[in-house]
Amino acid sequence: MTDKKIAVVGIPGKWSTEALADALEQRTGFRLVIDMADVTADLATGKVTATGIDLCKLDGVVVKKITETYSPHALDRLELLRLVEAAGVRVFSPAVNILRLINRLSCTVTLRNGGIPMPDTEATENIDIAVDAVKTFGSAVFKPLYSTKARGMTIIDADQSDADIIKAVTAFKAENPMMYIQRKLNLPGQDLGLVFLGGEYHGAYARVAKDDAWNTTINSGGKYAPFECDPDVVEMARRAQDLFDMDFTTVDVAMTDQGPIVFEVSAFGGFRGAKEGIGIDAAGLYADYVLDALS
């Protein structure tokens, strides 16, 4: 037992948030779950508080979830945690590192610049170019820049009339001025999550799609299953997560006819996939890692 005071930023009542808070409480006797909606920053003094508690006097803050759904608003919340870091409090993972992953385009550009294999992707605000991308790809997935678990994603196929393609692209652009367009790949009914803690690989799980669902997310009925990765796949994922220097993350990988590719590196990582797919206690491992880093 240690007397470290370590808070968890997350969604009160959510399983992964509470699991991490439980693990830290078991090791420290201290429990604090912070909803970022309750955080206030005084930029003149640098003081950051939540429900009357001065976060700048804590020993550490672990970010499990910054908001229920991704949006540019999440970036504002992370900026408040930068003030906590400036006061000398260790934040896991660092706020700037998470910032680079919240936005899908930022994550993709970093991965591309790092030479990581990815699906063919175009980003544009031009409707004509987006229509051409659909025709080139044959089938394209239009993805919001801020979303998780396939929320807001739209598939547009080239086997429609030009008018229908333009209509679908225009509707997507109305909600997403910068269009992120990715070739829809023929996947073997599953994709993978590779778990890393402090850059160390801890195993992989598969997300298996339900019936004919086009995506594998749990929101769409997918389920977790164990998976044994080849060393070259692990090394590719390791190189991908190295670009972001996250304390805890999962790398989303798919096996394709052209070889393994990376979809994204997670801003927060999946505890449930690690537990149900691999059988590991990610919350406990993360708590031990945090305490070791603060010792």
Image (cartoon, rainbow, N blue to C red):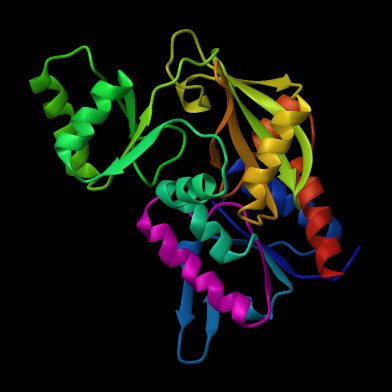
Outermost residue, left side: 163
Q: Which picture quadrant has residue 228? A: top right
Outermost residue, top side: 211
For residue 286, above or below residue 216: below
Horizontal side of residue 54 vs 178, given as left or right: right
Q: Nearer the viewer, residue 95 or 38?
A: 95
Which quadrant is the N terminus positioned in? bottom right
Image location of residue 157, percent across then percent down: 26, 18
Image location of residue 263, percent across then percent down: 52, 35
Q: Determine the residue positioned at 59% across, 76% down.
A: 84
Q: Determine the residue positioned at 33% across, 38% down.
A: 122
Q: Which picture quadrant has residue 274? A: top right
Horizontal side of residue 143 vs 230, given as left or right: left
Magenta residue check for 87 = yes
Residue 258, can we see it? Answer: yes
Q: Determine the residue positioned at 76% across, 24% down.
A: 230
Horizontal side of residue 135 vs 75, given as left or right: left
Residue 51, can we see it? Answer: no
Segment tinted magenta in the rendering? 63-92
Q: Which picture quadrant has residue 87? A: bottom right
Image location of residue 212, percent across then percent down: 44, 9
Which quadrant is the C terminus positioned in? bottom right
Q: What number of labels is visible?
A: 0
Image location of residue 246, percent across then percent down: 66, 55
Q: Nearer the viewer, residue 229 or 189?
A: 229
Magenta residue check for 32 = no
For residue 235, above or below residue 87: above
Q: Nearer the viewer, residue 30 or 142?
A: 142
For residue 21, above or below residue 159: below
